[in-house]
Image (tube, coloured by chain):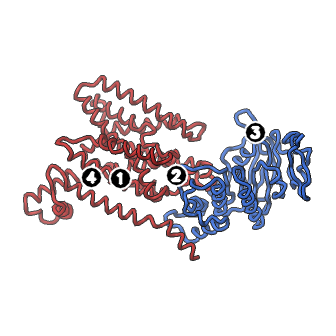
Amino acid sequence: MHKVFVSKKHYTRKKPLLLILGIFVILTALISLSIGPYDLSIKEVLNGIFQTKSLPLPATERGVLARLIIWEIRMPRIILAVLVGSALSISGNIFQSCFRNPLVEPYILGVSSGAAFGASMAIVFPAMFFSIPLSAFLFAGLTVLLTLSLGVVRGQIQTLSLILAGVVIGSFFSSLVSILKYLSNDAALREIVFWLLGGFYHSGWNEIYLLAPIIIPVSGLVWLLGWKLNVISIGDEEAKSLGVDPKKNKIILILCATVLTSLSVAYVGIIAWVGLMVPHAARMIIGPDNRYVIPLSALIGTLFLLFCDTLARNMATGEIPIGILTSILGAPYLIYLLRTKTV
Amino acid sequence: MLLQVDQLSFQYDTKPVFQDVSFALKAGELCAILGINGSGKSTLFKCIMGFIHAKRGSISFDGINAKRHKIIEIAKKVAYVPQDHPITFPYLVREMVLMGRTSRIANFFKISDEQYFKVEEALQALSLVDLADKPFNQLSGGQRQMVLIARALAQETKLMLLDEPTSSLDFKNQLLIWRTLLQLKKEGKSVLVCTHDPNHVLWFCDRVLILDNKKLIADGPPKEVMTEQLLQQVYGTMCTLEAVANKKMVLPRMS
């Protein structure tokens, strides 16, 4: 049995890495809480976080202000970055594993174009739609349903048909967005452009109360299916011969990925590259086992968005849309991957 | 009977691939399927594994119709070794073999020592321990094929189906694979192997099924059923059957 225990180390040595990165995320969040137009020290941030309302309020005026900035402005934004960073990275990983292609991104089935159309409609015709996120979410879901209905042939998920259908449906909705841009007035046009670039401008606790109860359990479910995702990523026939139903599990996983992506896109717009490159980075660090890639992707995605959002808030007097930053940082990374890895 | 195939017919759209194929496999048999390209060997395998569904006929494992088995139950009865292929993600050999235990693991976050032990046993059985921590994709074709067989071993099934396991291997590795299959037979497992080499069938197998012209035309011990006449029916007149050093061999006809 000795050899068995030796070999077991190979399977379990990855856990400390997750813990270290988790601590790193908390530290980054603290730093991000302290940086902004109104600078706070880490001590002030910690005071602000841990003094709850039942305790006497901080004596100084600065302390009151610090609490307000932390809890009402920066904390919701950071939590939203955590939720969206995890959601996009996890869904990117699902699509890459299900389609057995590391260059696939969460928007592959046309989610982003559908959401963009929904958001643009709500911006141009505000009277007809309840809210921008709701309209974006509904159209994102509709797009994926359309893509799936075209990509499933004779009850089988045909990867190539599905990806092609995603491209076609995506470009169709992009054209519709262009028409809306053409028709809209200056103010609406500006709002559409900003929405498309993505950002955490509208972060508040309401968004979090809505997103967290969905994103957290769905991500948990995906994590539980991590080993099955490993088996599916080898091939459908082999998965079946090993005891995993590829069709059923793929449908569940793709639906989870769609919910994660559509919700994120609906609230923060189109943030490019995160879902493409984060899972890849996670696999380079920890190997391809999805039981570890999924939590690590969530942590790296969170870290990346926290970093980009902190930059976006502080680089210029106005706020830079985060989608610009993720693309600027993501494009060189993809070139690096293409040069160094065979994909 | 471990496997029973009854009157199985399969067609792609309107083009029949094979018709009325029937045979049964009991424990401890090393049985080969022989036939030219396009004779439906791989399709037959896919039907048995449930990857595709035949229009007519039935397949049973342990006397129970395959349609009444769940996917996970079939994985506990039959292991499938596909042809060697690269994979997208760089799983380690160890992880690939652990996948063979999928149907036996209830909680993938708390895998017991016993499961790891089975993986280690399978790796040792095929002398793959030194390669255990290498990425599967960095191995040679022969090594990859051995890993896929190790994965099937780890699956601990009574029946194993191998789709052209020696097709991309050098002679040494071909012999190694056949030796492994003979060992499995000795241990009481049943092995169904699809191959292109009639000599391998003559040397190693104790039963052969020959598919030709959409039908199963022979079923029996290779030395008895593989006659010159039958081989010429399947492969044409370019080959002949001769005895070399007391062993039957299929040789090319040179003139």
Taking depth in this image into account, of A27 and A159 the one nearest to the observer is A27
CA–CA distance in space, label 2 to label 3: 34 Å
Q: Residue furthest top?
A: A183
Q: Are marks 1 and 2 on the same chain?
A: no
Q: Residue furthest left?
A: A60
Is A192 left, or right, of A252 in this rendering? left
CA–CA distance in space, label 2 to label 4: 32 Å
Residue shown at 35% from the left, 29% from the top: A177
Taking depth in this image into account, of A321 and A261 the one nearest to the observer is A321
CA–CA distance in space, label 4 to label 3: 60 Å
Quadrant (top left, top right, bottom left, bottom right) of the C terminus of chain B: top right
Q: Are marks 2 and 4 on the same chain?
A: no
Kind of residue indicated by mark 2:
Phe
The numbered mark at residue A249 is none
Q: Are marks 2 and 3 on the same chain?
A: yes
Taking depth in this image into account, of B171 and A148 the one nearest to the observer is B171
Q: Chain of mark 3?
A: B
Name the front one of labels 2 and 3.
2
Please name the residue that numbered disc 2 is placed on: B89
Chain-order first, disc 1 or disc 4: 4
Please name the residue that numbered disc 4 is placed on: A78
Relative image position of residue A142 (x, y in whole percent): 43, 36
Task: Write down the colour of chain A.
Answer: red
Kind of residue indicated by mark 4:
Ile
Kind of residue indicated by mark 1:
Pro
CA–CA distance in space, label 1 to label 2: 32 Å
Task: Write down the colour of chain B.
Answer: blue
Kind of residue indicated by mark 3:
Val
Please name the residue that numbered disc 3 is placed on: B17
**SS at circle 2:** loop
Q: Are marks 1 and 4 on the same chain?
A: yes
Residue A145 makes an appearance in the image: yes
